[in-house]
């Protein structure tokens, strides 16, 4: 893992003029109306509205564009703006800028399941027939069908309209199909944007640039040179107040089926012929369809699931999962999963992909680690020290960046001693620019009509086809998840999963 304060070797210092030139002026988009169903919710206030505010600050929101929050709560425009104002000021927004942004924000109170209020909402949207219309469904997925049906009934899918679906899209293949069918009756697939905010992260896009913009990596990007790949998404938080939602989901549905598989696809896909949406998504789909199946016959061998017990996080005692659910709770929902899979094609045959995610782990970190094979023969004496495998570490959070671990000679006299050091490129430092939140990029991609970084329906289906049998196998086993103490890296079986192959989970080392 990355440990702040460690000494690393940095690329040349800031600035990189040619890069700054490219990113300095954010391209303008067409005037739009962005409607957030669930506009008073956690996601809207914590992520979507701040993302729009930041784009506003960069001058990327054209005059006349409107952001409309929708929820049942009986607020008027001013009441809604006051809520957002508070959230944006607390996040450090300047008062005059926040107020200027809020002139473009409105609110309509309505219940997605009742007709009342929809006429007035439709009239509001109808005022700007030429605007791009984005309907962002930031509600629980049970409401997606009602909302889409009413958008159809009130004839709101007109002109340049798009719908954005938040995760989770269903809890299995059947329920995902139900949602996709219902949405598909109103919106064409080309208008449907299934968001996975991991794909909007700089590091993930940088993976495309690294792989396909450099001649260095692609010749080595295969089973001949790569030993294995690890993907870790670790959280220090527990479920907190989201226990009711989480207990119906669990780590596999919440993280692996969507985010982690999407990351895996970006690592493993064949070079697409272009960055056009379908060229990229066709290649990702092939990866999903090539994943080695895990089912009742091998789930015990390839998967480990866990559930946290009371322990310590960030120096404080914290309760276990069941205590957080409420007194007397019983649950077999996993808050941790580690698994080993393979991609059954020529490029990747025999290369294990180790995936792990969990709550109440020791560090908040998301990273992809590509571990290269050892050199075939060492020319160095034992006194030079061990030769360590090269690793390319792509960090998605907390600080987005890339490290390439190389072996060099320890500088100075004293004979030839080998050192393993990271060539470290922390994006924010190296480029002297702040990192936009993934939602900033993705929201404007929707307005632009660019679905490259969104999941197509067949991808969601393929991901469920792979994840479903794992969930079935766990259910059939009747076994409880293995307990682990909050603040540790999950059950010891997760360590054994990788160590019995003679490998270890990534730890930063020099
Ligand atoms: P939340 O805080 O519970 O907000 C739900 C929103 O939906 C509220 O604005 C609520 O307002 C509105 N709502 C509920 N019933 C409604 C109805 N019948 N008609 C109209 N509006 C209704 O949920 P959230 O955390 O923002 O999450 C929203 C969605 O995004 C969920 O599917 C979640 O899984 C997903 N998501 C969330 C996060 C996150 O960080 N929060 C991350 C990824 C994905 P009223 O009660 O006033 O109607």
Image (cartoon, helix red, strand yellow):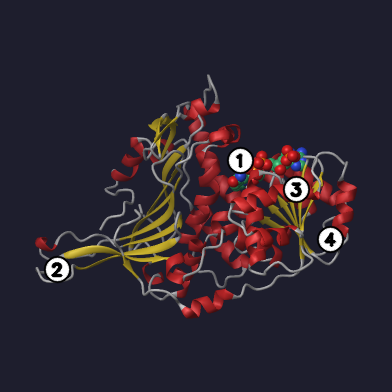
Q: Give residue 16's quadrant in the image.
A: bottom left
Q: Which residue is mark 2?
A: 379
Measure the alpha-carbon separation of dots 2 and 3. 68 Å
Q: Position of residue 76 (x, y in %)?
A: 81, 46
To which residue does mark 3 refer? 80
Q: Separation of disc 4 and disc 1 at Cα?
A: 31 Å
- Per the model, the C-alpha gap separating discs 3 and 1 is 35 Å
Task: Report which quarter residue 274 is drawn in.
Answer: bottom right
**SS assignment at label 4:** loop
Estimate how packed mark 4 is, as few (under 14), some (14 to 19) or many (20 or more) residues with alpha carbons within 10 Å. some
Name which of mark 4 and mark 1 comes first in the sequence: 4
Q: Nearer the viewer, residue 112 or 259?
A: 112
Residue 169 is at least partly visible in this image: no
CB under 8 Å between discs 4 and 1? no
Q: Where's residue 221, x and y in %?
A: 39, 66
Q: Is residue 308 above or below residue 221?
A: above
Question: Along the polypeptide, which appears first: circle 3 or circle 1?
Answer: 3
The Cα–Cα distance between marks 2 and 1, rounded to whole angstroms, is: 53 Å
Which residue is more in the foreground, 284 or 385?
Answer: 385
For residue 129, side relative to residue 440 (left or right): right
Category of crowding for the residue at label 2, using alpha-carbon neighbours closer than 10 angstroms: few (below 14), some (14–19), many (at least 20):
few
* Front in this rendered view, residue 19 or 58: 58
Q: Which residue is mark 4?
A: 158
Quadrant of the frame with the C terminus: bottom left
Of mark 4 and mark 2, the one earlier in the sequence is: 4
């Amino acid at each position: 893992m990355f440990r702040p304060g460690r000494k690393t070797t940095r690329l040349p210092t800031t600035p990189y003029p040619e890069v700054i030139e490219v990113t300095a002026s954010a391209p303008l988009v067409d005037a739009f109306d962005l409607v957030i169903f669930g506009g008073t919710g956690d996601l809207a206030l914590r992520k979507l509205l701040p993302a729009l505010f930041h784009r506003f600050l960069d001058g990327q929101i054209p005059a006349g564009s409107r952001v409309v929050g929708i929820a049942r709560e009986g607020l008027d425009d001013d009441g809604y703006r006051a809520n957002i104002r508070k959230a944006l000021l607390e996040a450090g927004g300047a008062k005059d800028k926040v107020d200027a942004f809020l002139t473009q924000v409105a609110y309509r109170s309505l219940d997605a399941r009742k007709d009342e209020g929809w006429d007035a909402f439709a009239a509001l949207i109808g005022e700007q027939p030429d605007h791009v219309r984005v309907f962002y469904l930031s509600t629980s997925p049970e409401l997606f069908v009602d909302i889409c049906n009413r958008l159809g009934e009130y004839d709101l899918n007109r002109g340049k309209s798009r719908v954005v679906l938040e995760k989770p899209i269903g809890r299995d293949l059947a329920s995902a199909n139900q949602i996709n069918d219902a949405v598909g009756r109103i919106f064409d697939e080309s208008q449907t944007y299934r968001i996975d905010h991991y794909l909007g992260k700089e590091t993930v896009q940088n993976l495309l640039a690294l792989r396909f913009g450099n001649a260095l990596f692609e010749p080595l990007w295969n089973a001949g040179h790569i030993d294995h790949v690890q993907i870790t998404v670790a959280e220090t938080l527990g479920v907190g107040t989201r226990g009711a939602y989480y207990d119906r989901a669990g780590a596999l549905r919440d993280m692996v089926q969507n985010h982690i598989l999407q990351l895996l696809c970006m690592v493993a896909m064949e070079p697409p012929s272009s960055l056009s949406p379908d060229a990229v998504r066709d290649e990702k789909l092939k990866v999903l369809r090539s994943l080695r199946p895990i089912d009742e016959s091998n789930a015990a061998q390839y998967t480990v699931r866990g559930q946290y017990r009371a322990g310590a996080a960030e120096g404080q005692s914290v309760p276990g999962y069941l205590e957080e659910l409420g007194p007397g709770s019983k649950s077999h929902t996993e808050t941790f999963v580690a698994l080993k899979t393979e991609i059954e094609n020529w490029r990747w045959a025999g290369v294990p992909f180790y995936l792990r995610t969990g709550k109440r782990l020791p560090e908040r970190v998301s990273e992809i680690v590509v571990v290269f094979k050892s050199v075939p023969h060492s020319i160095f004496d034992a006194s030079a020290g061990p030769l360590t495998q090269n690793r390319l570490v792509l960090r998605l959070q907390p600080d987005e960046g890339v490290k390439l671990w190389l072996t060099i000679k320890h500088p100075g006299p004293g004979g030839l001693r080998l050192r393993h050091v990271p060539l470290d490129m922390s994006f924010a430092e190296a480029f002297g620019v702040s990192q936009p939140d993934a939602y900033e990029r993705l929201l404007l991609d929707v307005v632009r009509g660019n679905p490259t970084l969104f999941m197509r329906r067949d991808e969601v289906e393929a991901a469920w086809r792979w994840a479903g049998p794992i969930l079935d196998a766990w259910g059939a086993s009747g076994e409880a998840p293995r307990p682990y103490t909050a603040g540790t890296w999950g059950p010891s079986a997760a360590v054994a999963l990788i160590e019995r192959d003679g490998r270890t989970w990534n730890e930063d080392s020099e």
